[in-house]
Image (spheres, grey):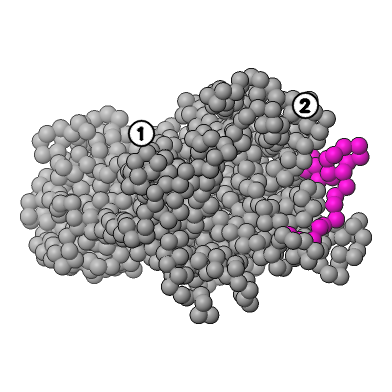
Amino acid sequence: MTLTDPRPPKAPSGPDGVLARLLDHPERRSRTALVAVPALALLGALVVGGVLMGIEGVAPLSAYGEVVRGVFGRSRGLSDTAVVATPLILLGLGITVAYRARVFTIGAEGQYIAGALAGTAFATAAPLRELPAAVLLPCAFVVAVLTGAAWSGLTGWLQSRFGASVVITSLLLNYVAAAALAWAVRVGMRDPNAFTPQSRPVAALPDLTGTAIHLGFLFALAAVPALAAVLRRTRFGFRVEVLGASPEVLAVNESRPATTRLAVLAVAGAFAGLAGIVEVAGVTERMTPAFATGYGFTAIIVALLGRLRPVGVLVAALVLAGLTVGFDEAERVFVIPSATVGVIQALIIVFFVAGDALSRRKAG
Amino acid sequence: MNTLFTLATLAAAIRLAIPVAVAALGEVLTERSGVLNLGLEGTMLFGALAGYTGARVGGPWLGLLAGLGAGAACGAVLALLMVVVRADQIVTGLAFTLFAVSATTYLFELSYTIGEPPPRIESLSMAPLVAIVLAVLVGVWFLLTRTVAGLVLTAAGDAPGAADALGYRVAQVRSAATVAGCALGGLAGAMLVCGPLGLFVQNVTAGRGWVALALVVFARWRPGRAVAGALLFGLCDAAQLRLQGTATAIPYEVFLALPYLVTLVALMVRARRSDTPAALAIPFVRGRST
Amino acid sequence: MLGIRRGFGTGPAALDGVDLTINAGEVHALLGENGAGKTTAMRILAGLDRPDAGTVAVGGAPVTEFAPRALRERGVAMVQQHFTLVPTLTAGENLAMARPSGRLRPPARQVRRRVDELAARHGLASVPTDVPVGRLSVGEQQRLEILRALDADARLLILDEPTAVLVDAEAEALLAVCRGLAADGRAVVIITHRLGEVFAGCDRVTVLRRGTVVCAGEPVADHDRTSLATRMVGSAPTAARSRVVRASPDGAVRLRLRGAALRRLQPLDLEVRAGEVLGVAGVDGNGQAELEELLAGVTGAEQGTVWVDDAPVPVAAPRERIARRIAYVPADRYRRALAGPLSLADNLELGRGPTRRPPRPRREAHAAPALTEWDVRSTGPGAAAASLSGGNAQKLVLARELAAERALVVAAQPTRGLDPEAARMITERLLDAAAGGAAVVWFGAELDELFAIADRLIVLAGGRASAPFSPPYDRAAIGMAMAGGHRR
């Protein structure tokens, strides 16, 4: 049917919709439009949040004032925000790579856990843990990154070999990772000196001098321009774009889509694994059953709000982290249900999805 | 391993399987029509909250009804976004679930005063719940295999172009399937709360909606197998709960991971998805080839 | 149908001023080459498309609503080349969906009886009803489509290239069925490009050429193969194109196929020399797509070998293909050659370019001279490829593929959908490539064009290649070869 019809297709082939149109060359659309929808979504969510708080009997403006003070007014406000933002940035960057290629993995959570597990296991294993931290930690990081990459790459392999959708397989692997975590803290890596199930402590990441921010934040910050450069200036980045635009054009002119897809997933998993070990070494010190806090899913929101661009991811992560930290503080002063910040964050993405879809419909 | 398979374990397995089974049945309907509903977990949560609230007002049966209604409402919203507006199904579903986790916690906290434990509700015993599961199973099975509506639903998921050429409105079919599937999801959440559990806590569904999603793939989109799969999950769940207390050679976490691993393997054995609805998660636009 | 006009985008209209009359009780053949407009006209009649101008009347009453359901209710049914059956449902289920008799599905036995009766009534072999349709043979699927149309009591049945997917025996059976249906008082339209069928089973014939009617509903008995073939491909070209005089190629053999076969393409032997332009003519669906894929290394041959410069063509390895200096200008340029959302500069980089890419402004500056040299009109190297018109898009593809000296140029329908000026430029550049020593294989739909540029011409029909023709080209013989069509 298409061979005799020279009309160009009206839209990129494949799943249409918010995500696809999101990827319609952000470069080519004006900056303002790009930022407007997420900003408005944020504003809308804050307004609704304010209304909710008002119903509770809390004056919204005072509450928000407290939120802002919690971040900017306290001595530790900014550093807390940076620490919370670190895993979000790293995870968000990984998801950005995948989603730009239209590989919709939702396994970041599992890769995060898997990477953290592997790195922690390495760093707390019997002979190795005697090594000096300066040697042990970097090695543990490498192990974590490779494990995350493999956990993610597995879904890519399953798709090439068996046609199993990455969406489903990545979701399933999240659960497997969670089970592995449960076992590891109870038995596998259990700290014999602790009463409750947890792993031995891992050597801590040093803080940046003079601050309460651990080194991981620096990694995250450095990763932003690094990834931007890779996406813009390397062959791999080029293939990511082409795969997202048209797998067939990629196959005929540049490289095998399966190979590129695998590479993309491996990169995404690597970022997730790094985020995991950074969180252990920088924040929690050891792995506990409560390690999985859903960062993997929040990071998807971060990536989308950030319009799948590294700088956007950084901004979105900082904003969401700031909200979390600020509300934490505000809850000490006002009686705000702890679920409020979660509702606001969730509203941001709901408004964003709806707003973006509507803005597209109006445009075309 | 006799201790594993006592009647008590079996009973626990059934109890744990019930909500998952109903949710999975609902998702079978939705996915067969071509819509991938990642908002199932969120729908179950809303259903659970509605069930709890309804039960407090007028007893557990009212709770179940409320869950059904809440689910349908979620379905309407999701259908609007995913089918009519054609927003990306994966993103929308995920966003909805994330929203639901926070929203239900928030709404629940509104409804009771801090310091007092939330009231327990009168709960239903297992027998009526099992009856409901069987009724839903028969209903879904009958719809899919014996009615023309079921044919049209399958066509919407496998070959929407053909259905459209025959004059059926694919968008309407998919919307209806989404609403129905979500209604069952809401019912499942309500059954969880109004059943032997008897109360609501934050994130009470604890990922059962995701389990149901995986179950649908495992069951190859067939209702009977979905219920069987739910039972398998329930068994693994009951086994791991049981093993938690005892010291055995097999770590109970194996049973935690087992259902998902089995599903993964099942995806590998049958190469080249022949059972997946061909147009799953692909919005239908007349004129595009499908 | 009166005065029908239908255009798509820029370029000449697909149908222009088409008048067509089909009577009850006859089998009517609609004949023509690729792009002649046959399918377009029938799609309009079946309600799958609407005309830009003109009127359609069915059974005396004019058609106001162009939707498949509406036309089906008027008794018009079309069996297209791409079936509209649901492959995972059984035959019975497909029928039940089309014409439900109540809310519930009838039991299997009833369905089987219904299908058998239907088949028997119209002289068709029946179809298994308990197997998913996707597993039926193509012939059976087609029968099912026809049965479904008959179940809805179609009075006007349109079959689009029905014998393309059938073996001889099945094709004959089908024609017999059509005659039977006509005898029953219905009208049957068969869209085809095969003369054999026209003479085997049709009463009247209409020939379309380039969107206009060149032979309107004349009785088949009044014609013979030659006269119809001539009508199909036209007699002397309206605008006589002089043959481009080039030095006769005597270079080394650059492209060599030995027994190469893939899907519909039967084992093929072929040799093309450096500097030679080989034209490949034939109606779509006779192996051209397969040959195109073999030459470009998109798919590997199921049998035989494809060699360029004494080494096999790399399969599924685009960068190696480019390194071997094989240029590929695909027929489906928007699906295979250009990534719409990416910029012009990016598209030029596909398959080429260093691992470390320079920053965007430098890349775009680098691309600008190529755009000027190839006269690609756009808003700049940063514009999205999807924003280009057909002609400019094709120039962009050539700018990339012909940037350096080539060993083999695979050009599939390179001038399709282009305005004359763009087409002329494309043609010139391709001939330049040949002059530079490349072997050029040019798949074309328009015989005039092929006659003007090809040193030799082969015709693909039924998956087989004819013996090569040399200039001066015998139009009638080539037309016959195209319309011959061996069946599988």
Check the residue under mark 1 and report the chain it is in: C
Residue type indicated by callout 2: Phe
The residue to which callout 1 is attached is C7
Q: Is residue A233 visible?
A: no
Query: Residue C405 placed where, x, y %?
Result: 68, 50
Residue type indicated by callout 1: Gly
Q: Is residue B241 left or right of residue A266?
A: left
Per the image, is A219 magenta? Answer: yes
User: Is C302 situated above or below A320?
Assistant: below
Depth check, front residue: A187 or C402? A187
- Magenta extent: A198-222
Q: Quadrant of residue C322?
A: bottom right
Depth check, front residue: A80 or A266? A80
Query: Residue B210 placed where, x, y %?
Result: 50, 53
The local secondary structure at tag 1 comes to loop
In the image, what residue occupies the spot 60% across and 67% down? B244
The outermost residue toward the left is C184
Query: Residue C187 placed where, x, y %?
Result: 13, 49
The outermost residue toward the bottom is B2
The nearer-to-camera label among 2 and 1 is 2
Q: Is residue B3 left or right of residue B124?
A: right
User: Is C133 situated above or below C188?
Assistant: below
Depth check, front residue: A35 or A285? A285
The residue to which callout 2 is attached is A72
The local secondary structure at tag 2 comes to helix
Main secondary structure type of the part rendered in magenta? loop
**Crowdedness near tag 2: few (<14), some (14–19) or many (≥20) residues, C-alpha within 10 Å:** some
In the image, what residue occupies the spot 43% across and 32% down? C10
Check the residue under mark 2 and report the chain it is in: A
In the image, what residue occupies the spot 82% across and 57% down? A202
